[in-house]
């Protein structure tokens, strides 16, 4: 993740709002007694499919399952969803 909140704070995913809208909400809710942090922004919009995959993950999922390559590189920034993608692939593939 880009920035982790301090220890003792939780995380929440916000879907359906732009980053500017989320920042506005954070500014409105943030107080010295109860600070609110923006921890990570994976993409401007996070459209998810039924497996919980974002658009880029869906493309990688399809490519992984249909490719004849023996070795693949799944890379991305921290929090991009690489582990979630690979878990969905492993649920689908049988050996």
Image (tube, rainbow, N blue to C red):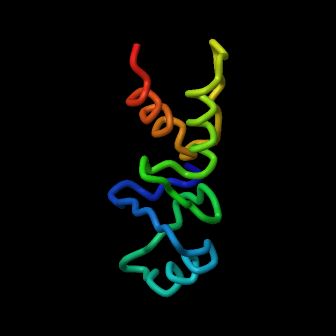
In the rendered image, the vertical position of residue 70 relative to residue 59, given as above or below? above
Residue lying furthest front? 66
In the rendered image, the vertical position of residue 94 relative to residue 58, given as above or below? above
Which one is in front, 38 or 93? Answer: 93
Q: Report the side of 89 relative to 45 (left or right).
A: left
Please give the name of the residue rendered at 58% of the width and 77% of the height, measured from the top-left corner. Answer: 23
Residue 35 screen position, x and y as percent: 43, 74
Counting labels gives 0
Please give the name of the residue rendered at 57% of the width and 83% of the height, measured from the top-left corner. Answer: 24
Residue 43 screen position, x and y as percent: 63, 58
In the rendered image, the vertical position of residue 15 relative to residue 72, given as above or below? below
Residue 33 screen position, x and y as percent: 36, 79
Please give the name of the residue rendered at 55% of the width and 75% of the height, measured from the top-left corner. Answer: 17
Residue 18 screen position, x and y as percent: 61, 74
Where residue 12 sits, quadrant-wise, is: bottom left
Q: Quadrant of the C terminus?
A: top left
Please give the name of the residue rendered at 37% of the width and 77% of the height, measured from the top-left corner. Answer: 34
Residue lying furthest left? 8
Which one is in front, 9 or 49? Answer: 49
């Amino acid at each position: 993740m880009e920035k982790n909140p301090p220890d003792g704070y939780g995380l929440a995913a916000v879907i359906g709002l732009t980053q500017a809208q989320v920042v506005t909400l954070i500014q409105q809710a943030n107080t010295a007694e109860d600070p609110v942090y923006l921890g990570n922004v994976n993409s401007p919009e996070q459209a998810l499919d039924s497996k919980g995959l974002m658009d880029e993950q869906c493309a990688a999922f399809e490519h992984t399952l249909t490719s004849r390559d023996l070795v693949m590189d799944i890379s991305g920034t921290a929090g991009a969803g690489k582990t979630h993608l690979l878990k969905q692939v492993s649920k689908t593939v049988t050996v």
